[in-house]
Each structure stands twice: as C-alpha cells, then as structure tokens.
Amino acid sequence: MTKIIDPYGSELVQDYKKVVKDFGLQTFDSVNFPNPNKLMRRGVVFAGRDLQIISKCIREKKPFYALSGIMPTNQEIHLGTKLVVENLKYFQEQGAKTYILVADLEAQAARGVSLQEGRERALKFHIPAYIALGLDPKKTIFYFQSENREVVHFAYQAARKITLNEFKAIYGSADPGRIMSAVTQVGDILYPQFKERMPGIIPVGIDQDPHIRLTRDVVSRMKEKKFFSPGSLYHKYTPSLDGSVKMSKSKPESCITIPEDETAVKKKIMRAVSGGRPTLEEHRRLGAEVEKCMVFELLKQHLVEDDKELDDIYQDYKSGIMSAGEIKQIAVEKMINFMKDFNNKLLKARKQVDKLQFVKF
C-alpha cells in the first residue's frame, strides 16, 4: 500500500501507476479533452477524479468551475506552481468559471505569516505572477480566506461531518492547526457552489489529494446540500535537477524558482543530472539515456511548447547526435528567455491588480 501522501509531509511519488491504483484515481486520457495542452499531451498530467463529468461540461458547454489557491509564504514560486496555472488556464479557456483564493489564514496558522504580510505578498507578487503565467485576469475571481466569512462558517459545518480517526487516516496526524487548515480548504473548494451548484475541477500536485478526498467525503455526508463532488487533475512532479523525484526549495542548488537570475539559472542547469554517457565517444555510439535526464524533463514540462521541436531534440539526443552539453545549452537559453518574458509580464500584471475582480463580503 502506498504510504500516506499529504500536503505537509515529504513522501515522494516514485510509482504513479501505483498511486492511481491505491487512491482510486482515473488515468488521464487527453483524447477526452479538446485541444489538450502540452502537459496533457505529454503525460505530465497523469490522473484525476470525475474527469468524464468535466469533459462532458466542456463538450456540452455546461457550467463548471476551476479553482486553485495561493499560499503567500515566499517572494517566489516553484515550477510546480507553473504547472498548476497552465492547467487552470486550460480549463479557463474551455469555459470554466475560474477562482483563485489567497490562503492567508492557512499561511498564518501553518507558517506564521501575518494576515497583513500575506496580503501584501499576494497583491505584489503572487497574483501578478499567476497573471504573468497566463491566467486571464478579466475571467478570474479572487478572494482572501480571511475575508470570506461564508467559507469560514462552512468550515465549522464541515468539521462536524469528519471523525478524528478519519482525519488521521487521510493526513497522518491531527494537530489543531492542520485540522483548521483542512476544513477551511473544504469550504474553499466548495465555495463556487454556494450560490450555484455545478461540477468543479481542482488542478493540483498529487500531494494535495488529501484535501480533495476530505471534501468529497464531506459532500457525501451532506446530501441535502446537493453539492457536486469536486473533480481533480493531477500532474507529476518536476524532478529535482540532482535526480531526486521532486524539485524542492530545501535543495536550492537543484531547484529553479520563478523568478531567478540568469547566472543562477545557467549554473544550476549546467550542473544538472543528464542522460549523457561517461565519454563523448561512448555517447555518440550509444546515445543518451533520456529517461535519466533532468534537463530533458525541464524541456518537456516547461520550456518547449511545440511537440515536433521536442521530438527533434529527443531523437537527436537519443541517437547521440546531440551531446549532454548541447541539450543543457538549449535549456539554459530557453529558461533565460522564459524568465525575461515572465519578468516583463509581471511588471504589466502588477498594474492590473487594482482592476481585478475580488469578491466583496
């Protein structure tokens, strides 16, 4: 049985097929979704819940929502956040009512970030960053947890539907801060349905699945409310540049954050684990071990939009025509261009914050 995977722990997923089986997920198939993005096409998105309901909503143009949260604890974001925003953008373009919540209450309870500090970080960086990564600000509704009394009130109702043993089974432990954060997130996930019942999808990393499971359990015990159980979409981790399963800020030398300066980006990528052979002669003869290359994974997940371009790189690298040094140089140039583009878009997005749709309570 897969160990407990939770948003607070460090358990890493090394066998995604086993996770799908153990947690009763649906394997994602991009043919069921129109114009799938590159993450969907390339298997980076690997599973979900109630995907057929969302697919039907898209095809039949029926109301549904997509939601994600911001944890305003740092002045930069992780590449994994970029994957979430890319998938959120996809559903937004397919007609989803899109919501972004700022988890300032959770940041205060779990990380000691004051509400004022969380608000400032969200407005100055995190929200503009989501816009810079492609979210349409005119089609997105924002709110702060601390201001949303409906969510907080609902959290207390949700808490009455959960047993302590169940909570421990899902999260591994049940300290008061964790319980409060989790039940508040149940309210967040269902908030778009408070006024209109409709299906929803939450694109996240697999470590956030406990929140989805808990919410679905609460919905099943509140049948009189007639909520739709939230659907979900899971993407694989962006692996650490040192070859570990998950890129983590605890290993800054192997983790690329957004934004990051050019010198640091180049140094990290050039030191990354590649699929190159011990000698160039051997590499030319045998070709790269692409499945071991963290640099190719960066290209696949984040830096190459066109499938043919990616396949050309793959074939040249796999055959030994392209060396490890050459693929690293490609990644360096593309990552530097991405950072420049992000910084330019971030400056423009900051000027739009005053015009955003914030829920008024």
Image (cartoon, rainbow, N blue to C red):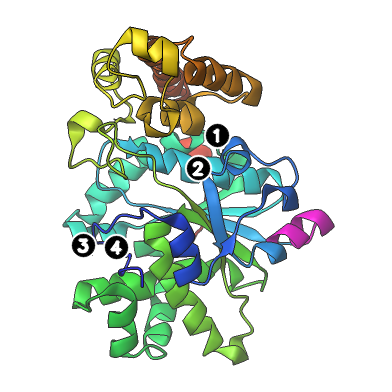
Cα gap from disc 2 to disc 1, whole angstroms = 7 Å
Give percent across and percent down for residue 277. Answer: 33, 19
Question: Which amino acid type is marked by label 1?
Answer: Gly
Marks 2 and 1 close (CB-CB < 8 Å):
yes
* 307, above or below 116, in the image: above
Q: Label 4: few (<14), some or many (≥20) within 10 Å?
A: many
Q: Seen in the image, is 32 located left or right of residue 356? A: right
Cα gap from disc 1 to disc 4, whole angstroms = 26 Å
In this figure, which residue is indicated by the disc labeled 1?
134
Labels 1, 4: front one: 1
Rendered image quadrant of residue 114: bottom left
Cα gap from disc 2 to disc 3, whole angstroms = 23 Å
Question: Which amino acid type is marked by label 4?
Answer: Leu
Q: Earlier in the sequence, mark 1 or mark 4?
A: 4
Give percent across and percent down for residue 287. Answer: 44, 18
Q: Earlier in the sequence, mark 2 or mark 1?
A: 2
State the residue in front, 145 or 239.
239
Q: Secondary structure at mark 4?
A: helix
